[in-house]
């Protein structure tokens, strides 16, 4: 399983807990700060998950680091800071693999793909990370930059031809929302040499059904619940 990382899970404490609970991969969402630093946070704004307000793109890293990113989730997480992708990669190296979702829309970050690739290389994590995005052009750009980095396309729909969409993005995998995934989709993907990773599944019975369908990985907020069936 992979852990779907809501912002509270983007702290060292929660990452460590996720690993102890049996996660094979931990999912991260990345945005760019005003001074061009890759930061790990789910939303394009800091409003929901910190004590600040505003867009990530309009704040420098120093400003973002001043924010409390944990109290909204629980008092025991008070004072947790928004991490950079560099910090997460350094922590993960030798410990656990990562899924890095590049957030590109509705706020767009020109050049974010190059920065992500550079960060992966700087930390020797190219072979330990899967890069995904709802922006399929973004996925294609990563593959053009470094063909050896594993990639996947995210989508929340019944695509007319998922395999064709993956091919257009030069992707290695499909990452559909579980509500829109069928057994035939999985079979077609596998015949085309594509992996299938679906999300977000917190019900063990649903996870068991998806496992029978042959999905390669499942994104969940509760890896310990799914370990008995996956």
Image (spheres, rainbow, N blue to C red):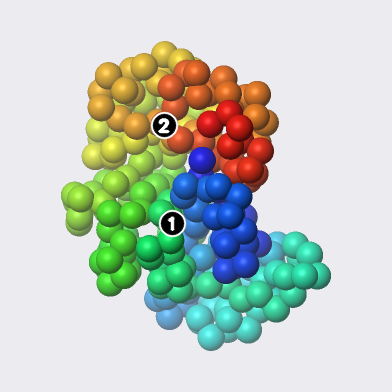
Is 195 placed above or below 112 here?
above
- Circle 1 — which element? loop
- Is 25 on the left-hand or right-hand side of 63? left
Task: List x then y, in percent, for residue 139.
Answer: 32, 47
Task: List x then y, in percent, for residue 118.
Answer: 27, 68
Residue 55 is at least partly visible in this image:
no
Mark 2 Cα shell of 10 Å, populated few (<14), some (14-19), many (≥20): some
Mark 1 Cα shell of 10 Å, populated few (<14), some (14-19), many (≥20): some
Q: Nearer the viewer, mark 2 or mark 1?
A: 1
Residue 216's tag is 2
* Residue nearest the viewer, comparing 111 with 61: 61
Q: Earlier in the sequence, mark 2 or mark 1?
A: 1
Is 211 placed above or below 29 here?
above
* Residue nearest the viewer, comparing 117 with 230: 230
Task: Spot the residue most to the top.
Answer: 184
Which residue corresponds to the image point at 57% horizontal and 61% vertical from the top-left?
A: 15
* Residue nearest the viewer, comparing 172 with 138: 172
Using the rendered view, name the quadrant where residue 97 is placed. Answer: bottom left
Residue 91 is at least partly visible in this image:
yes
Is 66 placed above or below 201 here?
below
Which residue corresponds to the image point at 28% horizontal and 72% vertical from the top-left?
A: 122
* Residue, disc 1: 96
Q: Are marks 2 and 1 in contact (CB under 8 Å)?
A: no
Task: List x then y, in percent, for residue 163.
Answer: 31, 25
Task: List x then y, in percent, for residue 136.
Answer: 35, 43
- Circle 2 — which element? loop
Which residue corresponds to the image point at 66% horizontal and 38% vertical from the top-left?
A: 225
Question: Residues under labels 2 and 1: Cα distance?
Answer: 17 Å
């Amino acid at each position: 399983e992979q852990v779907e990382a809501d912002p509270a899970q983007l702290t060292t404490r929660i990452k460590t807990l996720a690993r102890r609970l049996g996660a094979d991969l931990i999912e991260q969402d990345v945005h760019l700060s005003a001074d061009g630093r890759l930061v790990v946070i789910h939303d394009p704004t800091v409003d929901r998950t910190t004590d600040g307000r505003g867009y990530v793109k309009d704040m420098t890293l120093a400003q973002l680091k001043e924010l409390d990113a944990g109290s909204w989730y629980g008092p025991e997480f008070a004072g947790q800071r928004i991490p950079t992708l560099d910090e997460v990669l350094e922590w993960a190296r030798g410990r656990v693999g990562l899924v890095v979702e590049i957030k590109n829309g509705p706020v767009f970050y020109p050049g974010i793909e190059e920065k992500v690739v550079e960060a992966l290389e700087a930390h020797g994590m190219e072979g330990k990370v899967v890069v995904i995005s709802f922006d399929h052009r973004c996925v294609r750009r990563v593959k053009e930059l470094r063909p050896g980095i594993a990639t996947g396309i995210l989508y929340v729909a019944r695509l007319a031809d998922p395999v064709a969409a993956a091919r257009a993005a030069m992707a290695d995998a499909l990452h559909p929302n579980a509500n829109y995934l069928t057994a035939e989709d999985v079979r077609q993907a596998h015949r085309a040499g594509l992996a299938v990773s679906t999300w977000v599944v917190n019900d063990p019975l649903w996870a068991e059904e998806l496992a029978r369908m042959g999905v390669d990985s499942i994104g969940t907020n509760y890896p310990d619940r799914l370990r008995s069936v996956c």
